[in-house]
Image: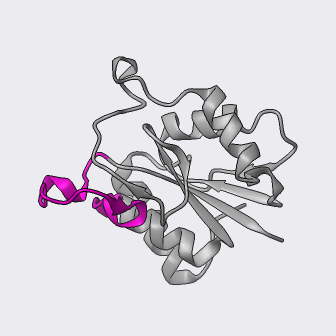
Amino acid sequence: MTTLVIVPCGKAKIWDKKSELNFVAAKDAYTSTFFRLNRDYAYNFGDRWVILSAKYGFIDPDTMIEDYDISFNNKKTNPVSKYVLKEQILIQNLFQYNQIIGLGGDNYRRRISESFEDYQVDIHFPFKDCAGIGHMQRAIKNSIQNKKSSIK
């Protein structure tokens, strides 16, 4: 079984502390504890992983990106559309995985579900029942430590 893990981007970015940097690999751009835990989860349980960015959409972790301030939570910032995400799924062959694990909160889960609605894929959100980010972080840490993806 092949697994794709989709990791949410984050507001905290490397440019917050190193504004002189231009382009950085996406996997190194986001600096929050939550992103790092999700990234570690993806390395442990995925055959491939991508980042879901409000600016760039589904991006490979090695894609070079620049600083931005766009959020799915603020439509005025013009986040990437569902239609662009659907196109990226096709172009990047993201639909070809036996299972997809989506990480992140409600907004990311909704974006992932909507984006893949045209495909017969098995999507799991293993931490959807967590009450808040702290609980989610603990659950992700436990999954990694116990070497169990937490998919039921």
Q: Position of residue 82 (x, y in %)?
A: 62, 28
Q: Is residue 14 magenta?
A: yes
Total marks shown come to 0
Image vertical order of residue 91 relative to residue 118, above or below: below
Front position in the image: 36 or 144: 36
Residue at 55 percent across and 82 percent down: it is 146
Front position in the image: 76 or 102: 76
Q: Is residue 68 magenta?
A: no
Res 97 → quadrant: bottom right
**Residue 1 as seen in the image, left or right of residue 145:** right
Residue at 74 percent across and 39 percent down: it is 116
Image vertical order of residue 51 relative to residue 140, above or below: above
Res 96 → quadrant: bottom right
Residues rendered magenta in the picture: 11-34
Image vertical order of residue 20 relative to residue 118, above or below: below
Quarter of the picture holding the C terminus: bottom right
Residue at 22 percent across and 59 percent down: it is 14
Residue at 68 percent across and 62 percent down: it is 4
Residue 138 in view (yes/no): no
Res 141 → quadrant: bottom left
